[in-house]
Image (tube, grey):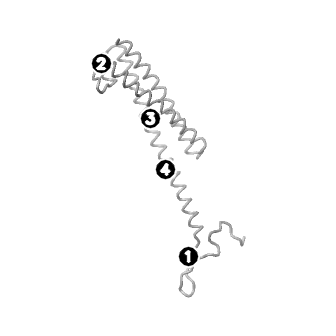
Amino acid sequence: MKQRSFEKLVTNLDEMTKQYRLLLECVRKEKELLIQSDMEKLNESNATKEQILTKIKNIETSRVNYATELAQVVGANATEPRLLEIAQKIGGAEADKLRSVHSVLELLTKRLIEFNKENATYAESALNTVNSAMDNIKESLMGSKTYQKKGTYQQGYDKSGHLVSKEA
């Protein structure tokens, strides 16, 4: 029973590791796409990322079940099963495998967080650039506001609203 539960959990964790690596690669590519402002490929990347995240959620659900099962078998906390606690209870080479997988998943998670923070910075910068460009376009379309010699206010209408001057 213990060996079967352990094998199910390890197989699940290996699949989770694979998916996290795919997600990390996707997020790394996303950084380049943000810098290049390639919206078509960025949309494709987002769709791929959503598929990977859906797989990870499904794997995570199974992981909790498998970890709970193994925790019960080895006498660890089955309410909130933790890999390191299970490893401590199980001992030997199996414990080393669980610790190793735990370390890899922890490292992948940290890298994902770092890349996501960088990507958020790039996305925010791109958004600010677009907003500034929109503000500049709005200002050029509104026209200039000037005072006439009489001291009354006049909205400049002869050139406003035109991106290209007729005088050219």
Label whose residue precedes the other's in the sequence (4 or 2): 2
Q: CA distance from mark 2 to mark 1?
A: 77 Å
Q: Is residue 115 above or below residue 105?
A: below
Q: Work out whether mark 4 precedes mark 3 in sequence or the reverse, and give the earlier one.
A: 3
Q: Earlier in the sequence, mark 1 or mark 4?
A: 4
- Secondary structure of the residue carrying tag 3 is helix
| Mark 3 and mark 2 residues within 8 Å of each other at the beta carbon | no
Query: Dividing the image into 4 quarters, which one contains the N terminus?
Result: top left
- Tell which of 72 and 142 is nearer to you: 72
Q: Quadrant of residue 142?
A: bottom right
Q: Position of residue 12 (x, y in %)?
A: 43, 22
| Residue wearing tag 2 | 72
CB contact under 8 Å: marks 4 and 3? no
Which residue in the protein does label 3 denote? 111
The quadrant of the image that shows the C terminus is bottom right
Mark 1 belongs to which amino acid?
Answer: Lys
- Residue that label 1 marks: 145
